[in-house]
Image (spheres, rainbow, N blue to C red):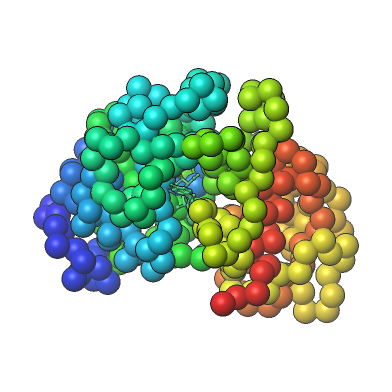
Amino acid sequence: MAINKDAASKAMKLKTETLSPDAKGLRRAERILSAGGLVAFPTETVYGLGADARQGKAVARIFEAKGRPSFNPLIIHVANLGAARAYARFNDAALRLAVAFWPGPLTLVLPLREDAGLSPLVTAGNPTVAIRVPAHPLAQDLLTSFAGPIAAPSANPSGRISPTRAQHVMNGLSGRIDAVLDGGPTEVGLESTIIGLSDTPVLLRPGGLPAEEVARCLGHDLEVAPENPETVSAPGQLASHYAPRAMLRLNAQTAQPGERLLGFGNTPGATLNLSPSGDLHEAAANLFRHLHRLDRDTGPIAVAPIPRKGLGLAINDRLERAAAPRP
Ligand code: TXA
Ligand code: MG
């Protein structure tokens, strides 16, 4: 039961525990986090790689385990709006969105409070902080019993496909993290929608909450963050991201010789289909799982067209990054 306190030097040698989704597993997860360890846990979007957001060394281990460039700030996860207010200042628009959509797949980027007490690594030195209240019952239980902010990026090696199952986490990070809390497959399957609210509301990353719903709640259209790799404020904005090893060709009606076909709706000859009935929620939930399955092989992948509305916006965003030229 020893907990790895100085894991930096042992990052490659850990024996990653799989924790059960019950009181015992939660207690163990909480202890590891308190001791400065890393625990992957399910949210309704994707699995997150959690550390105590107040412990600099613990947060540093996240970057090390993921191989993540350290200029990328992290989202903190808290149990509810009341807890979130200890870390950020909420204006009227922020409050309205939090009340409407939390808990849920929405992250708000807000001005950081001076007395927040977060490790500066979490915000990468920015005067803003990204906050989310996940809806998954296990994440809620963990946040309530831990009673502190958990910094958590998606639990995958940097630049690779996000995990929607505990097994995906193990495949990417086994030996580099202390534990994974196994809560089965995630429901939404796409990361949270990120809205910047330090100034006028801006869509920083499309995600599991359709941008149309956010705009409807605010009563006006959302600005969309310009894509500038020099001023990346969300690495979902980096060109190559969410990438399988194989090359992807998008908007393909049929597969060319040697290609495997990822279908949507009626797609004859599809190797896998995101949603045979053309349902965007089902497609979102299946996206990363199907990419993980196709990633077991290296042959090229053709992807059928997916409409750019509702969750289709976020699905196309992820596919375009997966298809982008690699650094
Ligand atoms: O659904 C999700 O959001 C998942 C689960 C685990 O919560 N998390 C997730 O984290 O996708 P990550 O680190 O893979 O993506 C978080 C994004 C990054 O693109 C990061 O740059 C952006 O949020 N971000 C974090 N803090 C920010 C800040 N202060 N300003 C602007 N963007 C920020
Ligand atoms: Mg990620």
Residue drawn at (61%, 42%) of the image: 203
Q: Residue 188 lies in what quarter of the image?
A: top right
Q: Is residue 261 above or below residue 148?
A: below
Foreground residue, 102 or 138? Answer: 102
Foreground residue, 222 or 262? Answer: 222
Q: Is residue 189 visible?
A: no
For the C terminus, the quadrant is bottom right
Residue 235 rendering spot, x and y as whole percentages: 52, 58
Residue drawn at (21%, 57%) of the image: 57
Q: Is residue 232 above or below residue 51?
A: below
Q: Is residue 130 above or below residue 83?
A: below
Residue drawn at (18%, 71%) of the image: 9
Question: Residue furthest toward the front?
Answer: 199
Q: Residue 58 lies in what quarter of the image?
A: bottom left
Q: Is residue 182 left or right of residue 32?
A: right
Residue 117 rendering spot, x and y as whole percentages: 23, 40
